[in-house]
Amino acid sequence: MSSGTELGAEEAGPAPNVLIVEDDEALAEEMALTLSDYGMRPTTAATWEAAIAAVEAAQPDLVVLDQRLGRVDTLPRIGALRALTDAPVLILTGNRAETDRIVALEIGADDFLLKPISGRELVARIRAHLRRVQQARPAEKEREKEPEQPAAGTWTLLTVERELRRGDGSVVPLTGAEFDLLAVLAEAPGHPVDRETLTKRVLRRPWRPDDRALDNLVMHLRRKLGPGGDRAITAIRSQGYVFTGFPRG
């Protein structure tokens, strides 16, 4: 990977923290050096466990995730990562199968990068996603200032478009895992759905008693629903979670 010098510097601002999850030590170091050259703060992780620990320790602004970490296929685990961070996730892989690309995007990845990738393209892709996040933040801040929520029944869950719309038509920016969680719970409003079912359908893996990924995902979803979000999704002791309806004004 050659970084090149054709890309200019981004506008002044805090250096973005980019987590590189790659088990090829030489490649990870090369990518980290390239990102450092362009004013970013890269950190690296070589295993899935190290990646999760890094996300929990310091929320990254973006994650570059290798599809294969040894024998671990990270695609089925994107949901667990999404439960911990809203940061863009860019899958890096040598696999050119269209099916994997589609699956990765549908379950929460933001981009799919094919190896080998040049330093220039990697930087450009990262910058594009970071700009998208920055552009979305002012609108989110404005919505947070709004004193009222739409009346019950005015929210719309669009399963084909995979969007949640408020009564005013604005879209709630959900990750793939957050949308899946809401969709599963909304299938049976008022009826608890157990953690095992939710974990299998949303995170695509079995639930474990010490598994906090689902609980973290619920927490993030409640926040995005706004005031009343904690009542919209209620925990039922020894059972799971129940959807009681969207927040009222």
Image: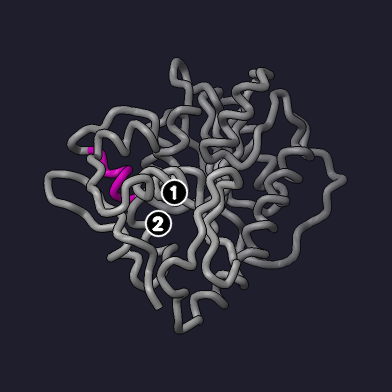
Residue 186: x and y, percent?
37, 50
Look at the image and give the residue range highlighted in magenta.
211-216
Where does the C terminus fall, quadrant-wise? bottom left
The residue lying at 57 percent from left, 72 percent from top is: 168
Where does the N terminus fall, quadrant-wise? top right
Would residue 118 be found to the left or right of residue 162 on screen? right
Q: Residues within 10 Å of mark 1 (few under 14, many from 20)?
A: many
Q: Mark 1 — residue?
A: 178
**Residue that protrudes farthest toward the front in the picture:** 153
**The stretch drawn in magenta includes residue 215:** yes
Dividing the picture into quadrants, the one containing residue 136 is bottom right
- Amino acid type, callout 1: Glu
Dividing the picture into quadrants, the one containing residue 143 is bottom right
Residue 47, placed above or below residue 108? above
Dominant SS of magenta comes to helix
* SS for dot 2: helix
* SS for dot 1: helix
The residue lying at 12 percent from left, 45 percent from top is: 238
- Asked if marks 2 and 1 touch (Cβ < 8 Å), the reply is yes
Residue 70: x and y, percent?
47, 17
